[in-house]
Image: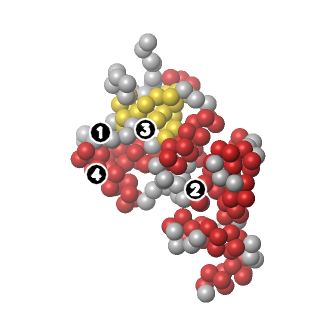
Amino acid sequence: MAMKLDAGEVGRQDLFSILPENITVNQEDNGRAVPQSEDIVEALARSILEHGQLEPAIVRRIEGHKVQLVAGYGRWRAVCHINDHLQPGQPVKLQCRVTHCNPEEAFLRNIVENNDRAATTPVDDAHNQRRLRERFGWTDSRISEFYGKSVSYILSLRKVLALDAPTQQALANGNLGLAAAVTLSELSPETRQETLEQ
């Protein structure tokens, strides 16, 4: 059965080839709290040009026969980078698989793909878990079951959200351990700063 997508000219096959500007993208649905660096996007863009896109992005149908990005934000950014900077006269299309899911299922799929590729940090997980609570009404016990982690671990990640952005970045980069981050979150801002400086 033919699928109608208002996403420009697309290839008729299992994979759809879609220009990135024809894909609706909501950065709040990205499972990474801190997007990939420009250097990583540049390297991925050059790899796509040299070897092709090895893994398709995932999009879902939305109203108006359009599609929205579910998973593959880095690949989407890399193809945008190719088209904007590396070869603007010869645009590349993003290879996509189309899935049928609602916003909650789409967000869960994004989390699962990133976790399967070990592409998230404790900071990413903490922010994603907050989104599950605030946007979809999940409890800590449901989050615990979904992640396959103890409730106490989920509560530890919740404390990470109280840290300032530089401290969260240190945790995300691996320069600060989770136990130390949790301890810092329980200190007053002044004491926390003094401890970090030491």
Q: Which mark is residue 46?
A: 4
Circles 2 and 3 in contact, beta carbons < 8 Å = no
Residue type (three-letter) at the residue carrying disc 1: Pro
The Cα atoms of the two marked residues, 4 and 1, are separated by 14 Å
Q: Residue at x 69, y 54 (%)?
A: 150
Q: Are marks 4 and 2 in contact (CB under 8 Å)?
A: no
The residue type indicated by label 2 comes to Asp
User: In the displayed structure, would residue 162 be above or below residue 111?
Assistant: below
Residue 61 against residue 157 in the figure, above or below:
above
Q: Which residue is mark 2?
A: 124
On screen, residue 168 versus residue 87, left or right, reads right
Find residue 52 and report its image quarter: top left
Residue 118 shows up from this direction: yes
Q: CA distance from mark 4 to mark 3?
A: 17 Å
Q: Residues within 10 Å of mark 4 (few under 14, many from 20)?
A: some
* Quarter containing the N terminus: top left
In this view, the mark in front (4 or 2): 2
State how far apart marks 2 and 3 are (Cα): 20 Å
Mark 1 lies on residue: 91
Category of crowding for the residue at label 2, using alpha-carbon neighbours closer than 10 angstroms: few (below 14), some (14–19), many (at least 20): many
Tag 1 near tag 2, CB within 8 Å: no
* Amino acid on which disc 4 is placed: Arg
Q: Nearer the viewer, mark 1 or mark 2?
A: 2
Q: Residues within 10 Å of mark 1 (few under 14, many from 20)?
A: some
Task: Name the amino acid, label 3.
Answer: Ala
| Left or right, residue 116 beside residue 128 | left
Total numbered labels: 4
Placement of the C terminus among the 4 image quadrants: bottom right
